[in-house]
Image: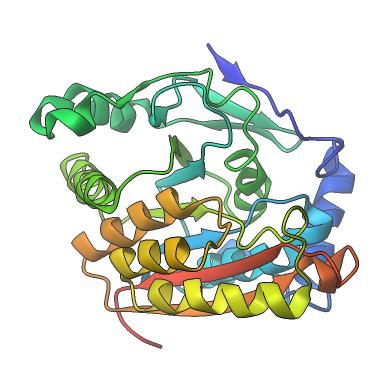
Amino acid sequence: MRVRTAVRAGSWYSGQKDRLLNEINAMYMHKIGPGRKPLALDQRKDVKNILGVVSPHAGYACSAPTAAHGFIALAEDRKEINTVILLGNKHTPYGPEISVAPFDAWETPLGQVPVNMSLLNRIIDNKQQLPDRLSKILDFDDTAHMDEHSIELQIPFLQDIYSDFKIAPIGIGRLPTNITRTFGYYLAEMIKEEGIGDSSVAIASTDMTHGNYSPVLNHDEVSSLDKLALTPMLNRDPEALEEAVQKNNISMCGVGPVKVLLSFAEKLGAKSAKLLNYSTSGLTCGPRSSVVGYASVAVMKSGD
């Protein structure tokens, strides 16, 4: 069995089980966090309204208070999940632009999470029905995932709120909107064919504006730029998101995964999106003079 071991445990988040659980609990109760912890599984409702979540992926000290809002929303929406499609950003040039992870399981200090290989095989085996330009950049590849953190950072939170679930990790590059839309629709069809359309969700991992390098931007400057990207995200409009990012030179790393998520949710009947939390590293782990933005967004079948 091929297991993808954690590469950021012990640095970006705690590498020991008990400490990691305490760290996650602290993120829920952080001043930026939701201020409450997830209920036990047997005390939760089973609303099944959330189709997808946008979640950040920096070190837990910086971004996890915002990420906690998305995970508690999932916990309050579903008692159980069959499969979480993890749409991670490709921070490296390795592998195809849509790199499907071929591992059988992903491991963190909280244990191993099985991969839904039936779904991933279906995605690859049926890619001939996709346009040629898309099918050529979609394939199994492990090199894109060996040192990639955007997917890994989501898994401990999922392990904390669910006891029995599978994941489908897919790395997404910076792709044009016609490609991300087609792939998002295709993913929705694949989970329907797999019989898990009502028991699965997607998480798109992105950080927002990176004002911690050239150009250096402060909390207010980053927040203003991020509002320009959040507006089309909340309107569930991937084309407008791409336009906002390009026009305003917004250094949002996971535009590709978010656009895939928006189209995936549209195909499954999304009617609304909600900003659960927005923060910057200036509010959590560093100076306000040079910050990165973080957002947690839920995409839903209906409004509140």
For residue 78, say whether it is visible: no
Q: Is residue 303 left or right of residue 32?
A: left
Instruction: Tell me which corner region of the image, top left, top right, bottom left or bottom right, holds residue 135.
Output: top left
Q: Nearer the viewer, residue 203 or 28?
A: 203
Residue 123 shown left or right of residue 226 in the figure: left
Point 46% across, 39% down: residue: 166
Give the percent coordinates (x, y) of residue 47.
39, 74
Residue 158 sits above or below residue 41 on the image: above
292 relative position to 17: left or right:
left
Point out the residue furthest to the top here: 1
Q: Residue 59 or 3: which is nearer the viewer? A: 59
Question: Residue 280 at what x, y percent from top left?
Answer: 74, 70
Q: Nearer the viewer, residue 229 or 276?
A: 229
Residue drawn where x is 41% and y is 53% of the image: 202
Residue for point 78% across, 54% down:
60
Q: Position of residue 236 (x, y in %)?
A: 33, 72
Quarter of the rendering occupied by the C terminus: bottom left
Is residue 75 positioned above or below 261 on the image? below
In-front residue for pair 124/112:
124
Name the spot of residue 216 as percent of width and height, x first.
Answer: 77, 61
Q: How many marks?
A: 0
Q: Answer left or right for 302 relative to 107.
A: left
For the point 42% across and 69% down, the residue is 244
